[in-house]
Image (cartoon, coloured by chain):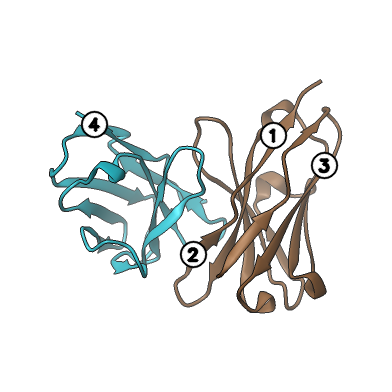
Chain colours: A cyan, B brown
């Protein structure tokens, strides 16, 4: 199985900050990398697909980059509603696997 | 609107089975895979398996092979996940999620079903 490792596991930031979350795959996955946002008690929401494509309706402050094994999710200017948990997921091969999550907290 | 609506919370005893339903609306049900993902309290997301509604073909994570069965009723646009031989560590929120072929991602999620396994 492909292991997905996110870093950091948590971070503290302020409204307006630029934040970057990293996701590393244990083997090559091309650009088959997705990012989800999950708020407490809610289902995950797709933010970015294919490493860098913004899902319809997602604010442009979210962006993704990377290919191969190393990927990043960047939030250019944190908004109050962005303080929650983010997961990466590989869609290169089954079993589809997720990172352990990164919790973005208010500083 | 496009949505997946899941059945309500379940409480089961160890050794029992549970079946969770996922009703699709707002799109052509046979056109997209349905995946199942679970999340234990305070934990991450764990993919369990997929089903192609048009054919009934399925694929399962090795961890759940032999214990999970994915089925569908196309006339009702509903997918089902049955998990047998329940243990306490199966206590989790279970989500169905639509697999979008072009996006290679889960673009629509159900609201989640809490399954509690307790004696």
Task: Evaluate whether label 2 is on the same chain as label 3.
Answer: yes
Q: Is residue B49 above or below residue B17?
A: below
| Residue A58 x %, y % | 32, 62
Q: Which is more foreground, mark 2 or mark 3? A: 2
Mark 1 — on which chain does it sit?
A: B
Q: Is residue A34 left or right of residue A13?
A: right
Q: Which residue is mark 3?
A: B84
Say how many tags the image has: 4
Compute the Cα span from label 4 to label 3: 41 Å
Q: Is residue B31 above or below residue B25?
A: below
Q: Which residue is mark 4?
A: A106
Q: In terms of secondary structure, where does tag 1 sit?
A: helix
Q: Residue furthest left?
A: A17
Tell me whether the residue at label 4 lies in contact with that at label 1, contact meaning CB atoms closer than 8 angstroms: no
The C terminus of chain B is located in which quarter?
top right
Q: Is residue A85 above or below residue A105?
A: below
Which residue appears at 21% of the width and 51% of the height?
Answer: A75
Circle 1 Cα neighbour tier, 10 Å, few/some/many (<14 / 14–19 / ≥20): some
Q: In terms of secondary structure, where does tag 4 sit?
A: strand
Circle 2 Cα neighbour tier, 10 Å, few/some/many (<14 / 14–19 / ≥20): many
Q: Which is more foreground, mark 1 or mark 2? A: 2
Which residue appears at 75% of the width and 65% of the height?
Answer: B78
Among numbered discs 1 and 2, the one appearing first in the sequence? 1
Task: Return the residue nearer the eye: A100 or A68.
Answer: A100
| Residue B113 x %, y % | 66, 44
Q: Which residue is mark 1?
A: B90
Q: Residue furthest front?
A: B1
Mark 3 — on which chain does it sit?
A: B
Q: Which is more foreground, mark 2 or mark 4? A: 4
| Residue B33 x %, y % | 63, 69
Q: Which residue is mark 2?
A: B107
């Amino acid at each position: 199985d492909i292991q997905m490792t996110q870093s950091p596991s948590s971070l503290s930031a302020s409204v307006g900050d630029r934040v970057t979350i990293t996701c590393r795959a244990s083997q090559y996955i091309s650009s088959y990398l997705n990012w989800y946002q999950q708020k407490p008690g809610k289902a995950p929401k797709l933010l970015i697909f294919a490493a860098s494509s913004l899902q319809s309706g997602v604010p442009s402050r979210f962006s993704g980059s990377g290919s191969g094994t190393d990927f990043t999710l960047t939030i250019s200017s944190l908004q109050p509603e962005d303080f929650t948990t983010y997961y990466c997921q590989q869609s290169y091969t089954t079993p589809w696997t997720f990172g352990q999550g990164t919790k973005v907290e208010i500083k | 609107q496009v949505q997946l609506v899941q059945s309500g919370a379940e409480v089961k005893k160890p050794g029992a089975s549970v079946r969770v339903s996922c009703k699709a609306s707002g799109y052509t049900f046979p056109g997209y895979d349905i995946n199942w993902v679970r999340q234990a309290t305070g934990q991450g997301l764990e993919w369990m398996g997929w089903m192609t509604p048009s054919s009934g073909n399925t694929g399962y994570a090795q961890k759940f092979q032999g214990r999970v069965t994915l089925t569908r009723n196309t006339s009702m646009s509903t997918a089902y996940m049955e998990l047998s031989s329940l243990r306490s560590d199966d206590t989790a929120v279970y989500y169905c999620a639509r697999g979008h072929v072009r996006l290679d991602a889960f673009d629509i999620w159900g609201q989640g079903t809490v399954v509690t396994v307790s004696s």
